[in-house]
Amino acid sequence: MSYSRRLFFALSLPDALQQQVIRWRAVSFHPDDGRPVVAANLHLTLAFLGEVSAQKELALKMQAGRIIQTGFDISLDDLGHWPRPGVVWLGTKRAPRALLQLAQLLRSQAARSGCYQSPLPFHPHVTLLRAATKPVAIPPATPGWLFNACHFSLYQSVFEHGRTRYHELEQWQLGQQDNP
Ligand code: 2AM
């Protein structure tokens, strides 16, 4: 086992929500605003790991499997534009504590395994458009989608035939939410 792969932990968006988001995006942005992320690639990154050796990948999977964390609901009610990385994103105005805890845990496990972690604060988001370096008219509101995170996954990012694809390598269930 001597290969290395480009990996990240993320929450996937349910298929139905992916379709709702791309339909809304098509009518909410101008084609020149940026390059739309394909529906299947819409996700919320929890921890980016970079190029990871097979040995390190195994250790990270074992650590991820030991995480005990309940599931949570995320309201996708925020939108923004970061001109420097050229990203238009969908986010949340109130990140649930469980989401922040999960990301924090995965990031500290990654850092302890030697994966560089950005010092920038975690800002949970789903990238909608890339290469969005010019000013973008951001719609005043989103439809306010709510999605339930009941698992998180390890993904491999593969660049082939001129496009990036994300392959889910493993998935871990989050615990049942308490009834409100
Ligand atoms: P982004 O969507 O905001 O660009 C896979 O590349 C995922 O990991 C992307 O969603 C990307 O976030 C995130 N990511 C975080 N840091 C990254 C980095 N240094 N290089 C590439 N992707 C990174």
Image: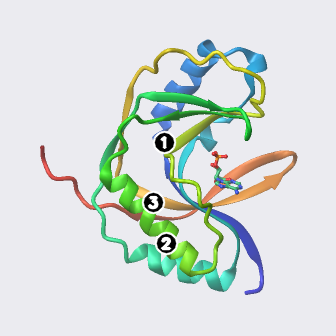
In the figure, is residue 73 to the left or right of 15?
left
Q: Residues within 10 Å of mark 3 (few under 14, many from 20)?
A: some
Foreground tag (1 vs 2): 2
Q: How many marks?
A: 3
Counting from the top left corner in percent of width and height, residue 45 is at 55, 52
Which residue is rendered at x = 46% and y = 18% of the image?
141
**Ligand 1 within 8 angstroms of badge 2 C-beta:** no
- In three-dimensional space, the C-alpha distance between marks 3 and 2, rounded to whole angstroms, equals 9 Å
Q: For residue 108, which numbered disc appears in the image?
A: 2
Residue designated by label 1: 13
Residue toward you, 29 or 155:
29
- In three-dimensional space, the C-alpha distance between marks 1 and 3, rounded to whole angstroms, equals 16 Å
Q: Above or below — where is 100 with respect to 27?
A: below
In the figure, is residue 142 to the left or right of 167?
left
Residue designated by label 3: 103
- Which secondary structure, mark 1? loop
- Which secondary structure, mark 3? helix
Counting from the top left corner in percent of width and height, residue 75 is at 36, 34
Q: Which amino acid, by three-letter code, is at mark 2?
A: Ser
Q: Residues within 10 Å of mark 1 (few under 14, many from 20)?
A: many
Sequence-earlier tag: 1 or 2: 1
- Which secondary structure, mark 2? helix
Sequence-earlier tag: 1 or 3: 1
Counting from the top left corner in percent of width and height, residue 2 is at 77, 85
Which residue is rendered at x = 33% and y = 60% of the image?
174
- In three-dimensional space, the C-alpha distance between marks 1 and 2, rounded to whole angstroms, equals 24 Å
Q: Above or below — where is 30 with respect to 8?
A: above
